[in-house]
Image (cartoon, helix red, strand yellow):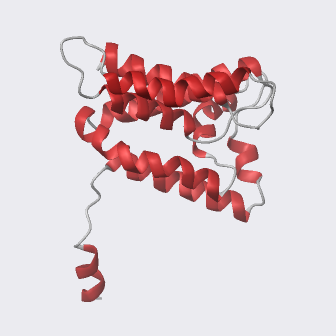
Amino acid sequence: MKEVIKFFNYFSYNSVVILSYFLICLLVLLLNHFTKGKVNQFFVMRKGSILNPMNYIRLLTSGLCHKDWNHFRNNFITILLIGPMLEEKYGSIPLLQMLALTTIISSAVHLVFYKNGAVGASDNVFMLIVLCSIVNITDGKIPITLVLIFFFYVADEIIKQFSKKEDHVAHDSHIVGAILGFVYGYFIF
């Protein structure tokens, strides 16, 4: 038993919000797998009565669901890479607020255009990417990194959103996440 305790003393839960977000999404992914998709069916936002309180909760819980392991992994590679740095810069509570608000807003916007809600954390991935590119803003000048991120990430999503090709990716959620990342970084924080 002492060896186990000693082993865990080598690790630090260095980013409370990001690591907790990762673990919750991983748990939801595993539960969804073992229930053969029932967890996602329950948690994912879809059009319904505005009188159903669960629909308001689903605006947030849809961001905890992922289609499969690849979807989960692709989102969390980026979140785990840049999230801890942003949590250190902005603080845990503000970052948690940004993540939650981004999920709620992008879920609501997605429902305007589609009958089913988007799943996953990619709206937050795009929010974090843009927020990271603004992190060293000075004197109100727009960083060149932000401009480059816009062209490499956001412009591509805008093109994909309006193309006729159906790829089952919520490009609108990516765009909303990027816009919110800009708003948080440039105007709010």
Q: Residue at x 81, y 25 (%)?
A: 164
Q: Position of residue 120 (x, y in %)?
A: 61, 42
Q: Position of residue 54 (x, y in %)?
A: 68, 32
Q: Nearer the viewer, residue 42 or 19?
A: 19
- Give the answer, above or below, for where 38 lies relative to 142: below
Q: Position of residue 32 (x, y in %)?
A: 69, 57
Q: Quadrant of residue 183?
A: top left
Asked if residue 10 shows in the view, the reply is: yes
Q: Is residue 75 left or right of residue 35?
A: left
Q: Is residue 119 left or right of residue 46?
A: left
Q: Quadrant of residue 10?
A: bottom left
Q: Residue at x 70, y 39 (%)?
A: 44
Q: Position of residue 108 (x, y in %)?
A: 64, 22
Q: Residue at x 73, y 44 (%)?
A: 42
Q: Quadrant of residue 136?
A: top left
Position of the N terminus, as image quadrant, is: bottom left
Asked if residue 107 shows in the view, the reply is: no
Q: Residue at x 80, y 30 (%)?
A: 165
Q: Nearer the viewer, residue 65 or 76?
A: 76
